[in-house]
Image: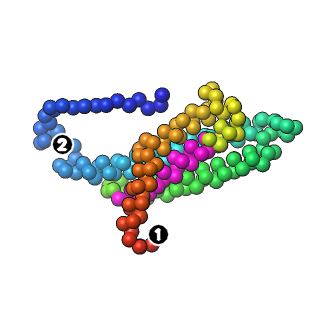
Amino acid sequence: RASPTAELVFENVFLPAKTHVVGDVNGATLCMMRNLEIERVALAAMAVGIARRSLDEMIAYASNRPAFGKSSLFGFGQIQKHISESYAEYMAGKCYLYAIANGLDLSTYGNGLDADGVKLYCATMAKNVADRAIQVMGGYGYCGEYTVERLWRDAKLLEIGGGTNESHHKNMARDLHKLDGDKLE
């Protein structure tokens, strides 16, 4: 529904090297690795946007929904917990994202640890915030005509696209192991 995917195959295609090379010969690794890092930061930004919208929807619903003699759902401790945890996680993800995006060097690669880390954190955070929004809205949150149902599906896709969470775990562990006892900044 959200991302059409197709296979593209080229067989027996001849490309003259002198006239059809983009960039430097043998320079594709730099471009590919840099683009993976940029993609992961962009997907983290999408996740932060999903979390913000989920939080907005959750707050609006909780503010306007009376229940059990209270003027709004904000009178219930579990709702307060869902909303406050969602806000704190959203702000943490937003700060992590802004820090990494601001420091990203687009002329090289080597930002993989934090590109993986910000995408891993923000994608999971967005799914958790969207999940809480569904919970706050009860049965309405699960219905297709409410925005949070779509936001949850989009957030779940971010845990898969651009590298699965498991691949980010592997990449980050490898990069952290390479520090070989050096302290983190």
Three-letter amino acid code at the position of disc 1: Glu
Residue for point 48% across, 53% down: 118
Residue for point 61% across, 41% down: 130
Q: How is the image coloured?
A: rainbow
- Considering the numbered disc 1 on the image, is that residue within a helix, a strand or a loop? loop
The location of residue 121, given as percent across then percent down, is 52, 52
Please name the residue that numbered disc 1 is placed on: 185
Three-letter amino acid code at the position of disc 2: Val
- Magenta region's main secondary structure? helix
Q: Is residue 121 magenta?
A: yes
Which segment is the magenta one? 110-130
Q: Nearer the viewer, mark 2 or mark 1?
A: 1
Q: Is residue 171 magenta?
A: no
Q: Residue 149 appears in which quarter of the rendering?
A: top right
- Left or right: residue 114 compared with residue 134: left
Q: CA distance from mark 2 to mark 1?
A: 39 Å
- Left or right: residue 81 compared with residue 112: right
Disc 2 + disc 1, Cβ < 8 Å: no
**Can the viewer see residue 41?**
no
The crowding category of the residue bearing disc 2, from other C-alpha atoms within 10 Å (few below 14, some 14 to 19, many at least 20), is: few
Residue for point 22% across, 51% down: 27
* Label annotation for residue 89: none
- Left or right: residue 119 compared with residue 135: left
